[in-house]
Amino acid sequence: MAFDLFIIYSPVVPFCDTHYNPHLTIHKTTMTIIYLHGLDSDPNANKAVITADHAKKFGIDTLRPDLNCPPDEVVTKILALIQDNPDAVLVGSSLGGYFATLLSDMTGTPAVLLNPSIRPDLSFTRFLTDNFDGQTLTDDTVIYTTTGGWQICYGDLAWFEKHRLTTKNPHKIKVLLKMGDELLDAHATKAFFESCEVDVVAQDGGDHRMSDYDEQVERVVGWVQALGESL
């Protein structure tokens, strides 16, 4: 399905203070997080639940849509949530980070990215195993089925290639990377966002799942509040 949707949003005041202060007092506020889970995940993923529980302490609601569907449907679903929640800040993990970046560019919605995917069209080629040797692949050929039931088709790779990421509003994006990510190239991700003048916090070690997320969530929610103050 071709994606051709244009939405006009009012200007947003730029977010200026890009540095996390662990001693910052986080005040309660009216705000909404739209948490976007990653591939082979769901709305009840560990990071999603930890984020929602921590955010709730500060009066921040968290919406956790199920993104186990084709990419054009994912975009439509997130756009509807943004329209219904103009106070929203996106928090996206892995593939959810890709969609958070894409939707932030489209709508001006602030976003916090956790080990984000930047080129799903390339990373998804890992599903083109020897099982497909000699086959003629069509757009409808299923190359992988996620644990949540999304049947990734060969044509989805072309969709992601067509929708390459840009960062029109770098001051509205914060990135948290684990340089020990075993699934995605954290160095390429860091280089991409830094070249776009996005503030990136890159931590040595760690893994793609961000197993120490319970130690990171205070930083993430602090970023959400700081970014949300510009709405």
Image: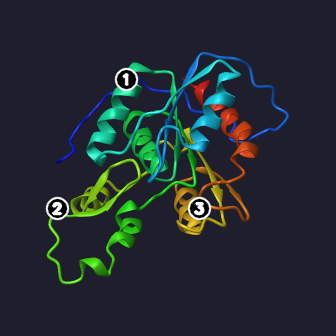
The answer to whether 187 is drawn above or below residue 110 in the figure is below
Q: Position of residue 217 (x, y in %)?
A: 70, 40
Task: Specify which label sits upstream in the sequence, 1 or 3.
Answer: 1
Color scheme of the displayed model: rainbow
Provide the residue designation for mark 3: 190
Q: Position of residue 54 (x, y in %)?
A: 69, 30
Task: Give the foreground label among 2 and 1.
Answer: 2
Q: Amino acid at mark 2?
A: Asp
Residue 16 is at least partly visible in this image: no
Whole-angstrom CA distance, mark 2 to mark 1, is 31 Å
Residues at circles 2 and 1 in contact by the CB criterion of under 8 Å:
no
Mark 3 or mark 2, earlier in chain: 2
User: SS for tag 3?
Assistant: helix
Q: Quadrant of residue 210?
A: bottom right
Residue of label 2: 139
Q: Secondary structure at mark 1?
A: helix
Q: At numbered mark 2, what does the secondary structure look like: helix, strand or loop? A: loop
- Tell me: residue 196, above or below residue 111: below
At a point 41% along the width and 42% down the height, the residue shown is 105
Which residue carries the number 1 mark?
A: 83
In percent of the image, x 65 and y 29: which residue is there? Answer: 53
Q: Give the residue at x 23% y 37%.
A: 5
Cα separation, mark 3 vs mark 2, equals 31 Å
Where residue 6 appears, x then y in whole percent? 26, 34
199 or 182: nearer the viewer: 182
What residue is drawn where x is 58% and y is 25%?
230
Query: For the residue carrying disc 1, how many other residues have a C-alpha within 10 Å: few (<14), some (14-19), or many (20+)?
Result: few
Q: Which mark is residue 185?
A: none
State whether residue 212 is above or below residue 82: below
